[in-house]
Amino acid sequence: MIGFVLRRLLQAVPTLLAVVTVSFFLIRLAPGGPFDLERPLAPAAMAALQETYGLDQPLAVQYLRYLGALARGDFGPSFSFRDRGVAEILGHGLPVSMTIGGLALGLALALGIGLGAGAAFRPGRLLDRVVGLGAGLGVAVPTFVVAPLLQIVFGLGLGWLPVGSWEGGAPAHLVLPVLTLALPQAGLLARLTRASLRETLALPHIRTQRAMGLPRRRIARHALRGALLPIVAILGSTAAALLTGSVVVETLFGLPGLGRTFVDGALNRDYTLVMGTVVLVGVFVIGLNLVADILCALLDPRLRIAR
Amino acid sequence: MRPAPHRRQCLAGLAAAALARPAEAAPAGLYRRGNDADPGTLDPHKSSTVAEAHILRDLYEGLLTYDNHGRIIPGCAEACTVSGDGLTYTFTLRERARWSNGDPVVANDFVFSLRRILDPALAAKYAEVLFPIRGAAAVNRGAAAPESIGVDAPSARTLVLTLERPTPYVLELLTHSTALPVHPATVTRFGAAFTRPENLVSNGAYALREAAPNDRVILVRNPHFHAAADVAIPSVAFLPTPDLASAVRRYAGGEIDSLADLPADQMASLRARFGGQVVLGPSLGLYALALDTRRAPFDDVRVRRALSLVIDREFLAQRLWGETMDPAYSLCPPGLDHYRAPPELAGRDALPIDREDEARALLAAAGFGPGRPLALEYRFNASDNNRNTAVALAEMWRGIGVATRFTYTDAKTHFAYLREGRPFDVARVSWIADYSDPQNFLFLLQSGNDTLNPGHYADAAYDGLMRDAAGETDLARRADLLFRAETIVVTDLPWIPVMHTRSKALISPRLSGYRPNLRNAAPTRFLRLEA
Amino acid sequence: MRGFVRRLFRHRSATVALGFLAAVALACLVGPELTGHDPGRIYPDLVGTPPGLAAHPRPGTVRPALERLAFRMRVTVRAVTIRDGTAHVTVDAPRSIDPRVLTYLPRSDLFGPATILERAEDGRRLVVSVPVLEQRFLLGTDVLGRDLLTRTLVAGRVSLVIGLVATGVALLIGLTYGAVAGYAGGRVDAVMMRLVDVLYALPFVFFVIMLLVFFRAGLGLILVAIGAVEWLDMARMVRAQTLSLRQRDFVRAAEALGLSSARILVRHIVPNTLGPVTVAATVLVPKVILLESFLSFLGLGVQEPQTSWGALIAEGARAIESAPWMLAAPAAFLVTTLLALNVLGDALGEALDPRRDALTAPR
């Protein structure tokens, strides 16, 4: 097991390097630069800025410099936030995204697995149908429709909750964004849980247990454990997506998270900010997928050999 | 009281629940001010956006500054004398001008600041705004030492500014962010980090308390400010509002006290919901179409005129932009200082059908007609109202047999494409002036000004008039020269003016003192917020 | 195969979903021809019309509309009477009225061609009769005054095409890539799967944004961009399947018979992975349609003059307070279509898994 983890960690280094390289050249070769503004700069000002940020160097030199700095843990200065370093901006955004994303993940898991299991054990009943429809809606309605609806109903109509803003993470301000972010994931997880659990319940050994008249509770626990495997398998990427922020939720609720940094960074050609976010997200994806794989291996020993 | 009364009525059954809502915790005296974007910097010399300008105006005070009517009023300077040739300005600083740490503001602080922004090592984006100062252009080019600019401090309270040539709008330039002072000791000590809340020393009505990226910037009253006793609002939080529709919802929920930008396509509904809280005002912006005058057929003035004639500017400004724009029949918006009523495009009063007939005739003369229809590509940067405008323009041009193809890209791609001088047919361009003077619009089309003039329009007569105007000290004669130059623009149409922008804001009834004005200036020190 | 079809149709919900999808596809295909409006046609005088069966202009709006037109015709409206769908309008002006200005009336989308009934005071006063047109907008109009029903149906074509084609691209790449990697095994497999890992770790939003920025955004490109990103899951799944299939007797037998690798892949491996792949594809179609809507939210989606459900919804979500119908119509189409696809996907999954028969008794 330890060998497996170590090997995976070692493999992560070249993967990350490849991600950094691809992203670097993608963003650098995109048309326009950080200093192309609606009101164009004087050529002299442009040249001075390019020089200040080293953009006048050949791309290969810039790439190597960036890698060198990254290796020292230096994410560089931001192009669009001229007073700040990228590390500082990410440092502001990450806790926000982790809070919202972590809560949304917890809520999605609880709702998704709970309701999905409930539906699977009573196929065709009312609960199954309601969950099926709810999960379908959760997946099908775009987030940017859910967010304004929640704002209008709970923020303006009922007046129970604030419409937006972060306010240092005050609990009331978290409810709507977390809900918006969690709903589609909950829908997905509910569907997956239901499908997987039904498959497990059809397996011969579970059917045998049923036939033997084992207590339902015990069968359920048994089946659920087996059914969790596909859920855990997708958990890595789901968690990474939630924890690194959602541009839609952050924009609509006015939250200072990473998702916005990322999309704004890409659209503003804030090269260093985008690269910093790419590295951070890459680390999250690789790390969480590794955790998911370890969990899978723990749940199903056969997989350890397959990998 | 919260706005949005109808919503309340619709949901009267839920009134009890609504009343039970914990009052939206507005900390006493905090003005939550919506600002369209997050500031990229709080260093006035590196600043480049309107959103930054709003914050900087509260944080710092220049020699002169704006009040809430957009009038130029004394700032750090209490008096100013101008030499007879209009080249030397002598300012006397206020005795009570103080930095937020209590240090007096001295003339050398301005000398330091102006040298700093013009030093090419700082890589300021808009140093060129200060080029009327003698020697500034050379310093910024790196051809001279920063010490050589025409700014001197003969005494602690006297500042002498020498200009390259008489510049009627120079006092207004001194209100611009680029002319704001920075505290020399902190800048020297902390370098780029001097704008951190823990380091920043500023001389305006407010001082920096907190700055979190994409979240908020909080300013608190500066007790050392010379007019601190008249500053009514103790603290202000600038909140970025990247999504305007949700910003309006936050406003309706009482979480923001004012918005500096509104979704133009929702104006009718905003007026119905918020009535007098929607405040529109003039501004110094232009929305225009640039044509690539280097290439056929757009080098043909007949084609340019035909395209301009059939644009229904009233429909665009009133219906599509909900009156947040004014139809533009000239390059300069009306109401500029040192100018007269600008010359107008021909055919404004003609019947639209006559305009269409004329456009068809012009196109026919240029060789286009049913047998050989004109096809053009319209380039613009994607945003909803730009897209709606493009669709409407295409429909208007279709009426005279012009087929329009769209190319729309993200803003960076669009502006980079134009800056690089690559070929295009028709492209959306815009301009927001730095000062209320026709020169700040008309210089856009001077030849050689290629980054601002993507079609590389060049006209010797126009350039000559602009040069003459720059050397003219008599304001009336200068206005005449500029008027003649603009007449060339509206006849020759290298740019087709479409609309003039207006400022648009939502202002809570709790907030008083907001007066829409051409400069779009609303310094917090002149506003009041009821509890 | 027959068993599969029978099992599928035993799900009543699957039959309904399939029928519904066919109806939506048909409506999108032929509907725009039947609504009586061109999807790009702008009705400047009917901007933001709410949905309903009533004909526009409504009687109450005829007079204000005439007054707006009169302003452009440089005349003043003095009297209006409407009878049997025809308005009798009296206008006057300080100067003699040029009858050509009457062409404004039929141009306004509200009225038909005008006929002059009476000229008085040297042509300074006219009485004209003008038919009031009847335009119907079942689902209302948008901010530019375009018919939403037509636009929603036309948008449906684009969204469905994106869903199908992008899924097809993902399927093709994923299936080929996964099968080759799984079958080749060893070093080739390792290298190929590392590439997949890299792409997994590459933040997806960033990747798509960059693709769209790079190449001028357009429908074709969005398809490729989405397909290019969504094949990863498919490749992993097919590879896993292939790995286990390779050990099976029939593949071994084919190898022993000396069949070429390509042939074995095409004849024996790929067909045996099709079951789970089909299920994955039905999940992918909704995912892709939603993804396009997300890109539209960012302003990077389908471009004018084309439109998609996502683009309409993004536009409608902004107008949710002022013109909720702009959101409701496309959202209803999108959500019901995606629900139907999900139901179909579930049913396919169960139908393809014969083991479940015992538990999935028909109901």
Image (cartoon, coloured by chain):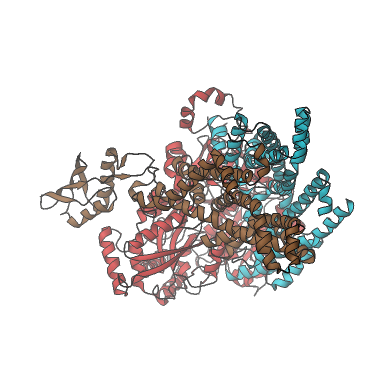
Chain colours: A cyan, B red, C brown
Of residues C225 and A278, which is closer to you in this image? C225
Hey, which residue is sitting farthest top in the picture?
B16
Residue B165 in percent (x, y) is at 52, 69
Residue drawn where x is 49% and y is 70% of the image: B454
> Is residue A99 left or right of B86 when viewed as pictured?
right
> Is residue C1 left or right of B378 when viewed as pictured?
right
Evaluate whether residue C163 shows in this view: yes
Residue drawn where x is 76% and y is 62% of the image: C252
Question: Looking at the rendering, which quadrant does residue B150 occupy?
Answer: bottom right
Residue B346 in percent (x, y) is at 31, 64
Question: Looking at the rendering, which quadrant does residue A81 occupy?
Answer: bottom right
Tally the marks. 0
Residue C56 in percent (x, y) is at 31, 43
In the rendered image of this protein, does residue C254 appear above or below residue B460? above
Of residues C14 and B305, which is closer to you in this image? C14
Residue drawn where x is 67% and y is 67% of the image: C263
> Is residue B446 left or right of C189 when viewed as pictured?
left
Evaluate whether residue C319 shows in this view: no
Residue drawn where x is 60% and y is 54% of the image: B62
In the rendered image of this protein, does residue A267 appear above or below residue B466? above
Residue B441 in percent (x, y) is at 46, 63
In the rendered image of this protein, does residue C277 appear above or below residue A70? above
Of residues A153 and A54, which is closer to you in this image? A153
Of residues B85 and A91, which is closer to you in this image? A91
Q: Quadrant of the C terminus of chain A?
A: bottom right
Hey, which residue is sitting farthest right in the picture?
A2
> Is residue A65 left or right of B501 when viewed as pictured?
right
